[in-house]
Image (tube, grey):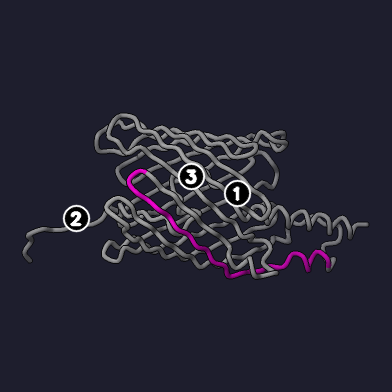
Amino acid sequence: MKKYIVLLILNLLTILISAQSDIRFNNVWNQPYIINPASITDQYLAEFNVIARQQWVGFQGSPTTLFASGTFYLDNLHTQFGLKVMQDKIGFTSTTDIDLTYAYSLSINNAWRLNMGLGLDFQSLAYDVSMVNSSTPTDPTVLTKLLNVSYINSQLGAELTNKSWRVGIASQNLNSLISPINKLFVNTNFMYVLYRNSRHGTFNLGYGVYGIQYSTIYQMEFNLTGYFNYTADREPIQLGLIYRTWSEVGLLVGLDISKNLRVSYSYDYNVSGISRASIGTQELMLTFRLDKAEKCINCSY
């Protein structure tokens, strides 16, 4: 009987890990590069992001996620190189994802550009066996189920942009479609449309929608955001609302600390059964941008 209970727990754990391998960062509304290697930031020489996410606060063993990214854009080559690193821990399991990305920006006309990107991913799954509370810790059923594994995966994306619009598609974990052993990093596909009013003034409006397909699960996410300009040469204060089908609502706040440093915070609450054991999910993102070097005209050396 104990053996069957252990098998049941391990199979349930596998389902949770598989679901957690596709994490919904709320700050994707500010930084689509989180999910799409084709999302280019060409206004700066480089951009760096760090995210800390604590999901289902108060729920024992709930997911804790750290994410970091850096992108470098080369104007003369219309090319962006990027690196993403994510480490996620749930219970006694942890997953690590390291992605190298490349994107190219193609000018369609004076207003629109088509960005195309791809990524190569190294993914690993590890277990802290010392945290496993089992009456038979040396049971081969436990030991064979809790083996550290690693995979090589890939991703593709495209994004059509102009001054106000972003229309993108992205596919993650493409190798999982043909690899029968890679079931923990499931192929996930995204489509999104984002709009932000770019008029000068004290208030601008932005909104967007994401469509997400994860295995046999389909979700939608919606966002409505107001941007408040407090000086003529500074980015706006941001205040937005998030809704994720079918049971999550959230708040997103952003503020410039300086010209190059921005902080964003989000809180969302799951109104389903998980709310009985959790007070919600919180996420903090820091963004640092490097300005492009000013071109010297009529200089002599």
Q: In the rendering, which numbered label is found on residue 294?
A: 2
Q: Quadrant of residue 194?
A: top left
Q: Is residue 52 magenta?
A: no
- Give the amino acid at mark 1: Thr
- Give the amino acid at mark 3: Asn
Q: Quadrant of the C terminus?
A: bottom left
How packed mark 3 is, by other alpha carbons closer than 10 Å (few <14, some 14-19, many 20 or more), is some
Residue indicated by mark 1: 64
N-terminal of the pair, mark 1 or mark 2, is 1
The residue at 36%/54% (across/down) is 41
Q: Is residue 154 magenta?
A: yes
N-terminal of the pair, mark 2 or mark 3, is 3
Viewer-nearest of discs 1 and 2: 2
Q: Position of residue 128 (x, y in %)?
A: 69, 60
Residue 184 appears left or right of 231 = right
Q: Which residues are magenta?
A: 141-164
